[in-house]
Image: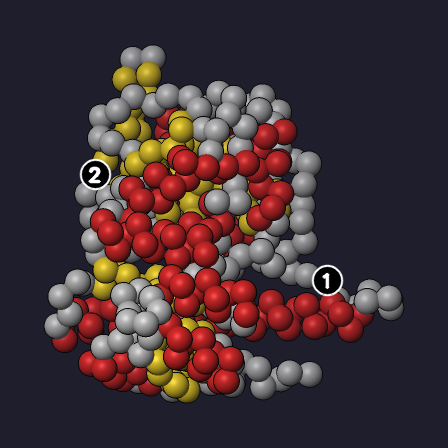
Amino acid sequence: MDNNISTNKIRVLVVDDSAFMRKSITIMLTSDPEIEVVGTARDGIEAIEQTKKLKPDLITLDVEMPRMDGLTALEKIMKECPTPVLMLSSLTTEGAETTVKALELGAVDFIAKELSFVSVNIVNIKDSLLKKVKEIVKHRRHKERLLKLQGLTLGQEKKYTAPTPARTGQLSKGLYRAIAIGISTGGPMSLQQVIPKLRGDLNVPVFIVQHMPPKFTKSLADRLNSMSALEVKEAENGEIVKNNVVYIAPGGLHMLFKKNGANVQIEISTEPANTLHKPSVDVMISSAVKVYGKNLLGVIMTGMGKDGYEGIKELKEVGGHAIAQDEMSCVVYGMPKAIVDGNLADVILPLDKIAENINMVF
């Protein structure tokens, strides 16, 4: 059944008050044969109307628009006709704060754009836009398909097993001296389900790499800090690591660690320069393993790609442990899938159980 689900074109609604931007985004999206733009809207009011009428697979949504802005429209869409939303965000501090708010309201991800749009900047976001649209919708359809299959077998002999069932009970109480979290697509809203639920007396540091541009990580850290018992901050070069502090790697830079006497010191660096992501989960975890060894707890959460796989592999080789987020609770099941498929996950957990399981071992 549903054999054609993967061949159906991805139906996108483009929302922007600029006719130039609507046309540019439409051209980018329709350059991929798997995607079609089923409609456009000039403001939030039109966006809501078109969403209800067209039922798109995904919406690209601008923030600054007349009559009704993007955040107001997003809130109404999530309540009235929930649909995956990809925000178009300016690379400014104000744009970053608005984006984090949008992700909190339910947007699944964002594309960072230059504030002054010229054609070269638009071309620069094309690859990222196409990749994110396809991964987000593909995973959503897959989840819906799994739920449908599970519904068909409800009350009957079990015919179907989810590919990543929860696996618990393999973490060691009292072993860990630090936590390293890697996360990407769907990360900000997922981190809000984990970091604020961690105990304020963990007595270890928490390190996070969230794939984000500069400025966005500072806004994310500030937002999480306002919600959490632990202190949450954007990591700074040269600072000494403290327990009960959550350090988020700055966008566009790597977070590394080195011993400084009895202390551990953070290094913020542009090196290595040849990584696919900056900050990189692999770089962060590999550096943390050199300092903490098997006493590091690795956590890989929602995100496309496989950043974190090599770092967790190093951690496992020295006797450490790793948690992977389960498939059904991920926005995109890429990074955790790499860990699970590589048999590197000691524990596989739904999003709402991650903080609970971490709290139990500290």
Residue 58 placement (x, y as % from top left): 45, 74
Q: Which residue is mark 1?
A: 161
Q: Mark 1 packing: few (<14 Cα in 10 Å), some, or many (20+)? A: few
Say if residue 250 shows up in the picture.
Answer: yes
Rendered residue at 49%/49% (across/down): 190
Asked whether disc 2 touches disc 1, contact meaning CB atoms under 8 Å apart, the reply is: no
Coloring basis for residues: secondary structure
Whether 136 is drawn above or below 321: the answer is below
Rendered residue at 62%/84% (across/down): 3
Q: Tell which circle, 2 or 1, labels the residue nearer the N-terminal end.
A: 1
Helix, strand, or loop for circle 2?
strand
Q: Report whether 298 appears left or right of 280.
A: right
What's the residue type where badge 1 is placed? Answer: Thr
Q: How many marks?
A: 2
The C terminus, quarter of image? top right
Helix, strand, or loop for circle 1?
loop
Q: Mark 2 packing: few (<14 Cα in 10 Å), some, or many (20+)? A: some
Residue 302 placement (x, y as % from top left): 48, 54
Residue 293 placement (x, y as % from top left): 44, 27
Q: Report whether 153 appears left or right of 231.
A: right
Q: Report whether 240 appears left or right of 200.
A: left
What's the residue type where badge 2 is placed? Answer: Ser
Whether 357 is drawn above or below 184: the answer is above
Q: Quadrant of residue 171?
A: top right
Rendered residue at 28%/70% (across/down): 65
Q: Which residue is mark 2?
A: 269
Residue 345 placement (x, y as % from top left): 57, 45
Rendered residue at 69%/83% (across/down): 1
Q: Report whether 113 appears left or right of 132.
A: left
Q: CA distance from mark 2 to mark 1?
A: 44 Å
Q: Which residue appears farthest toward the right when viewing the image? A: 156
